Amino acid sequence: MERIKSAYEKALERAEKITVSPEQLEAMEYAPKGSQAASQYMRDKNFILEEEFKKYGEKLQKHLRAGAEETFLSNIRLPENEAAKENNQRAFEGILALKKDKKSISQLFGEMEYLFNYYAKAKNQNYQNLKANMNKRFAATQQALERQLGTKVNLDLEKQPEFLQEWRKILNNINAQYENHLKEQKEKIKQIN
């Protein structure tokens, strides 16, 4: 009668059948090191990426660069505020340092800046439109409260739950639309050498 194998033994048998090439092993080891270097680059303005990569042989450069590129791309986001804009700029600089085709990358970054400007304009325009529409609705509520209380009432529209909820919905729609465009641009970056 044959002995029943444990799940552990079965897993070991499956693991023995898996073959990993030396190239894949190098990628698994050095891509995270490239990612760590990119993270340090994002935090430290004085960190020089190329000097860090020179510590490793020429053969490992593509793995280091691939890991760094993924980190830089993950740091590029829709600019919600000034800090996000600065973060994007630093990530752009990091990617530019990695790529050989500087002209194509610079052109693509120009397109992304254009996208970010449109994003900011769309956000602002939608915010102002919502504010104008909600102002009309809240004016009647404010007047009714003033009549009821017999005193001047100041309702801050932008702090009202209804306004905030409506703005979140609109902002989520805008973000979803622009995130798709940003994702396309990031894919284009990956295709450039």
Image (spheres, rainbow, N blue to C red):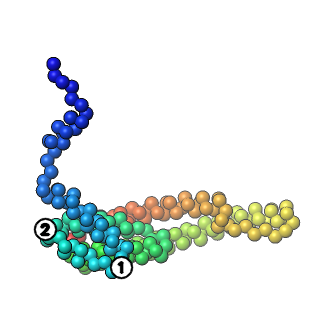
Q: Position of residue 99 (x, y in %)?
A: 23, 74
Note whether residue 16 is visible. Answer: yes
* In this picture, residue 110 sits left or right of residue 2: right
Residue 100 sits in which quadrant?
Answer: bottom left
Q: Amino acid at mark 1?
A: Lys
Point out which mark residue 116 bears. Answer: none
Q: Quadrant of the C terminus?
A: bottom left
Mark 2 → mark 1, Cα distance in angstroms: 27 Å
- Residue at position x 58%, y 62% in the image: 167
**Tag 1: Cα neighbours inside 10 Å, few (<14), some, or many (≥20)?**
few
The answer to which of marks 2 and 1 sits earlier in the sequence is 1
Q: Position of residue 182 (x, y in %)?
A: 37, 66
Note whether residue 104 is visible. Answer: no
Residue 68 sits in which quadrant?
Answer: bottom left
* In this picture, residue 56 sits left or right of residue 160: left
Residue 131 sits in which quadrant?
Answer: bottom right
* Location of mark 2 (residue): 59
Tag 2 and tag 1, C-beta contact below 8 Å:
no
Q: Position of residue 39 (x, y in %)?
A: 33, 69
Report helix, strand or loop for mark 2: helix
- Residue at position x 54%, y 72% in the image: 124
- Residue at position x 14%, y 47% in the image: 19
* Location of mark 1 (residue): 45
Q: Nearer the viewer, residue 114 or 13?
A: 13
